[in-house]
Image (tube, rainbow, N blue to C red):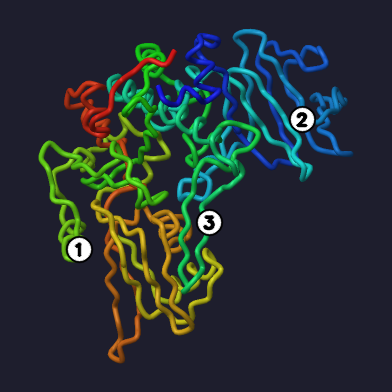
Amino acid sequence: MGTKSDPFLKKLASGQSACPLIKIGIMDNKHEVEMDLKGAFTLNNDTHASGIFYAKTQHGKISLYDKNKNIILSSNEIVFKNNGDSFFTLFHVKIGIDFHWEKREKQSFRGDLILKKRMDETIAVINEISLEDYLESVISSEMNSTAPIEFLKAHAIISRSWFISAIHKKNKSVKKTRPFSPQETENNTIIKWYEQEGHDIYDVCADDHCQRYQGITKITTDNPSKAVKETYGLVLTYKGEICDTRYSKACGGITEEYKTAWKDMDIPYLKSISDAEKAYKPIEDEEDARLWILWRPNAFCNVDDINILKTILPDFDLKTQGFFRWKVTYHRQELEDIIKKRSGHDLGTLIDIKPIKRGPSGRVFLLEITGTKKTITIGKELEIRRWLSHTHLLSSAFIVETKRNPSGEAESFTFFGAGWGHGVGLCQIGAGVMAIKGYTAQEILRHYFPDTKLEKVY
């Protein structure tokens, strides 16, 4: 494969690592960390460790204390080496960061635990684990362990592909600490998108910014382990390159193109397709968008059967209801306050909100917001969703209806929307329903990632 010039992939190709060890950032920028070591671990000073421990930064180091507050070790980096089948538990792990389902959990993990001091005297909490063990947790954190095995197999393949592709891109990147795209502020235009490249001392994070990784607590059936074992080392490729296999929760009936959410480039296997057994016309103008969003077409992700959703979605995702078609109404002053808080821009009294550019799924990736003080044009899809909600709008596939008083001033704005997430690549709920209908993992992957191939990298 062309990407085997990358050190990570060279190692795989040479057979040096049948399955690579990777580093996941579970928590970051913490001043204190509490952990419970279940089983036998060895510290980097050869001390054996088990039970409750606390860590905090002081005097330029990380200080580790046992449950009796006795100091055990002080270092810039503390490693808990797993001596076998042990696992560790972390407390107050934040998930769904900045999204409407954000909460804190107690989570348990296999592998080694690493505490690393940052320059700002905070602690990064890192889990080193094999890629395949990581995937078992990912697919049971992104979705439910009870989901159909063919769906979980498809998800294991795209999660493995996405990870290896992300590492390859990170290794090629000159500016590895860039958390988002440059902002363009000329003519009051702000274009911003978010990528995985901001992670410097670990490969990926554990939250939705990368892939959900919530440890072993979400693995409640044998399906995730079976799905990972049956797809061991398999990835999707396109013309010899490992695919950047994006995915989101629900596309709304048509998937989106890569460039509406990220860099202005066409990726052939991340093109727009209908999430259905029949083809739908892509959105081309505002009238198309209105007709599409106010309609409930037959689509794989058009499901409101709670029993089906309970089978494929984790508990906290079940709280998001009406995701296929949704509606949000804001009083004008409330939306003014949201935009000012979320963007840092005071637009004055809101006058109008106007989509400028849409993708084929109807997702807006360039939006004009007009106020009495100034007009700003923003993109791309995630930044638009951030500006228009206390957390995030479910998607940027929306139309806007403005209620005005007799003098023509805006009183409220109603957003009618479709789908949940950026809509690019695999539609998770749609793929889960496909598996329930009897589609195989390969058929699911061919549907969402056309013209790709399955290949084994280790």
Spatial distance from mark 3 to mark 2, Cα to Cα?
Answer: 39 Å
Query: Is 85 positioned to the left or the right of 291 in the image?
Result: right
Near mark 1 (Cα within 10 A), the count class, few <14, some 14-19 or many ≥20, is some
Residue 355, by quadrant, is: bottom left
Residue hosting label 1: 285
Residue hosting label 3: 182
Residue kind at label 2, given as amino acid type: Tyr
- Of residues 98 and 397, which is closer to you in this image? 397
Q: Residue at x 50, y 24 (%)?
A: 5
- Check whether the beta carbons of the residues at disc 3 and disc 2 lie within 8 A of each other: no
Which one is earlier in the sequence, the residue at label 1 or at label 3?
Answer: 3
Spatial distance from mark 2 to mark 1, Cα to Cα?
Answer: 57 Å
Residue hosting label 2: 54
Which one is earlier in the sequence, the residue at label 2 or at label 1?
Answer: 2
**Residue at the extreme bottom of the image, as rendered:** 407
Across and down, in percent, residue 65 comes to: 82, 27
Across and down, in percent, residue 246 comes to: 37, 37
| Location of residue 426 with respect to 74 vertically, above or below | below
Which one is earlier in the sequence, the residue at label 3 or at label 2?
Answer: 2
Residue kind at label 3, given as amino acid type: Pro
Spatial distance from mark 1 to mark 3, Cα to Cα?
Answer: 28 Å
Look at discs 2 and 1 and give the one toward the viewer.
1
Q: Residue at x 21, y 32 (%)?
A: 447
Near mark 2 (Cα within 10 A), the count class, few <14, some 14-19 or many ≥20, is some
Near mark 3 (Cα within 10 A), the count class, few <14, some 14-19 or many ≥20, is few
Across and down, in percent, residue 320 comes to: 36, 46
Total labels: the figure holds: 3
Residue kind at label 1, given as amino acid type: Asp
